[in-house]
Amino acid sequence: MSEPSLLELQRWMTSRIRPATAGTAADLRNLVKPQRGTPGVERLSVYAGGYVARTREALAQMYEAVRHVVGAHVFAELARRYAARHPSHDYNVNLRGRHLPEFLTTDPLTEQLPFLPDLARLERFISQAFHAFEAPPGNLTRLGELSLETWSTMRIIFQPSVGVLASAWPIVDIWEARTRPREEVDIDLINRPQRALVFRQGLTVRCERVDEPQHRLLDGLLAGRPLGAVCEELAHTSAAALPLDAWCASWARRGLLVRCEAVSAPLA
């Protein structure tokens, strides 16, 4: 047998560490020498186990509530399936679990627990909020000086940590129960949709329930749409007057607003 190239060695090592890639590389096990009576291939197995274990640890750190709901053993098997489907290509371990919400949409666990993908999306938002680079809050005291025409064309820029999520399930209640013993958790899941606002204050990420109109307004504004256009859509579907002043004041008080941009120039 001729000496393998570096590329062949790398592919074979990958096949040993990531079992899902087995069969795609030449079999070079004879090149790995035994040590103290332990076959070389057996010694390599520690790397394969470590790869899955590190994946499980990264997922558990990001998806604490998902792990709590399904239990440690089931979560470990979920991590194994995820590691096989989504091999790591990132240097930053914080990115390791970013595909889990989409992965859960087709995973057998979701047949029994249909809220899992939305719960994972919420936890991914929370993780992203924690690692976001915040900007200094804007000084928006001049908003009252603007004309109605300018106000209607204004775009509101939020902190990078701000996000909203709507679910047909009570995902905020489920997330909040992640620190309680599983046997004590009893949450009614039927006909209890919830909408969440996620943001960071200092080093603390907060997750709050918001009603449907505020969620729709935030969702449109976070997408970069002008305030007037979003409010006009809401006016067609809501009979009650929207408390825009109170909402904006609350966002500003908690430092969620960075600046407002009119069509002509930004207002900071």
Image (cartoon, rainbow, N blue to C red):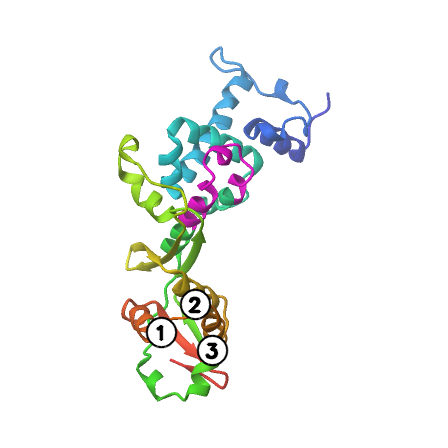
**In the image, which disc is placed on residue 217?**
2
Other residues around mark 2 within 10 Å, as few (<14) / some (14–19) / many (≥20): many
The residue at the point 29 percent across, 30 percent down is 183
Q: Earlier in the sequence, mark 2 or mark 1?
A: 2
Is 235 magenta? The answer is no
Other residues around mark 1 within 10 Å, as few (<14) / some (14–19) / many (≥20): few
Q: Position of residue 41 (x, y in %)?
A: 55, 19
Camera-side residue: 221 or 238?
Answer: 238
The residue at the point 60 percent across, 30 percent down is 20
Q: Quadrant of the rendered structure where residue 29 is?
A: top right
Other residues around mark 3 within 10 Å, as few (<14) / some (14–19) / many (≥20): some
Residue that label 3 marks: 228
Judge whether 257 appears above or below 52 on screen: below
Q: Position of residue 75 (x, y in %)?
A: 43, 31
Q: Quadrant of the rendered structure where residue 199 is?
A: bottom left
Q: Main secondary structure of the magenta part?
A: helix
The amino acid type of the residue labelled 3 equals Gly
Residue that label 1 marks: 244
Judge whether 215 appears above or below 79 on screen: below
Dots 1, 3 in contact, CB < 8 A = no
Q: Position of residue 136 (x, y in %)?
A: 33, 70
Q: Earlier in the sequence, mark 2 or mark 3?
A: 2
* Label 1 secondary element: helix
The amino acid type of the residue labelled 1 equals Leu
The amino acid type of the residue labelled 2 equals Leu
The residue at the point 42 percent across, 45 percent down is 119
The span from disc 2 to disc 1 (Cα, nearest Å) is: 9 Å
- Residue range in magenta is 102-124
Judge whether 220 appears above or below 23 on screen: below
* Label 2 secondary element: helix
* Label 3 secondary element: helix
Which quadrant of the figure contains the C terminus?
Answer: bottom left
